[in-house]
Image (cartoon, grey):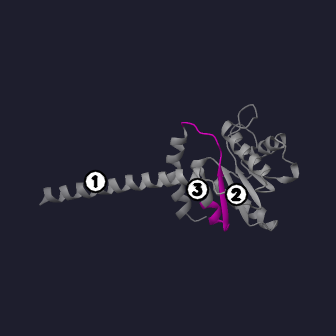
Amino acid sequence: IYKERKLKLKKIIFYIGILLILWFAIHITITVIDGLNDELEYVDAAVVLGNKVEENGEPSKRLKSRLDKAVELHEKKYFEYIIVSGGLGKEGFDEAIIMKKYLMNRGINEENIIVDSKGNNTMMTAKNSKEIMSKKGFDSVMVITQFYHITRSKLAFKRVGFKKVYSSHANFFELRDIYSLIREFFGYYKYRFVRI
């Protein structure tokens, strides 16, 4: 009887393991598809989520790619305003200020750029953007970030009250995206179930 129970337990653990692997694989697949398929709509504002600033004060390649996408879509009149959101990086730079300078150097007018220097994480960016946009009477938003970050970003913006959330991914890919995808799996469910 003991051996039979042990065998049954092993089978149950095995099947649970298979289900978890399937769940993970399906989730990652959906995240990639969602992230690579842009939802382009005319919106009140775009939000560019912050990322690393290099030690020389230049935006990292990842961050530049997000900002370049914002410039591209702004030129196509998808939105008038761009919210740049980031925190104080370990390099000592205010990401949002660096982002603003980069956009201005790319020809975006200062009055069309809104700075959020307290976007320390995705949820804070969503909350801050909601507060900023509500004051201006805006209700539609486009998030601009890396493809693997799109699904969780849209979830965060919906959780803080946005009804119209669209997205566009930055055209920059690197090997570390694999690690980022794995991290996003856990981050997504944290945002899904943890009280904000």
Is residue 85 placed above or below 62 in the rendered structure?
below
Viewer-side label of 1, 2: 2
Residue topped by disc 2: 142
Residue labelled with disc 1 = 14
Q: Nearer the viewer, residue 192 or 173?
A: 173
Q: Nearer the viewer, residue 157 or 81?
A: 81
Relative to residue 67, is residue 111 drawn left or right? right
**Tag 1's secondary structure?**
helix
Q: Are marks 3 and 2 in contact (CB under 8 Å)?
A: no
Residue at 75 percent across and 31 percent down: it is 56
Q: Position of residue 164 (x, y in %)?
A: 68, 66
The circle drawn on residue 152 is 3
Query: Mark 1: few, some, or many residues within 10 Å (few <14, many ≥20)?
Result: few
Query: Where residue 15 sits in the image (x, y, percent)?
Result: 29, 56
* Vertical relation: 149 (above or below) 160: above
Residue 171 is one of the magenta-drawn residues:
yes
Residue segment shown in magenta: 155-175
Q: Is residue 194 left or right of residue 98?
A: left
Residue shown at 69% from the left, 47% from the top = 50
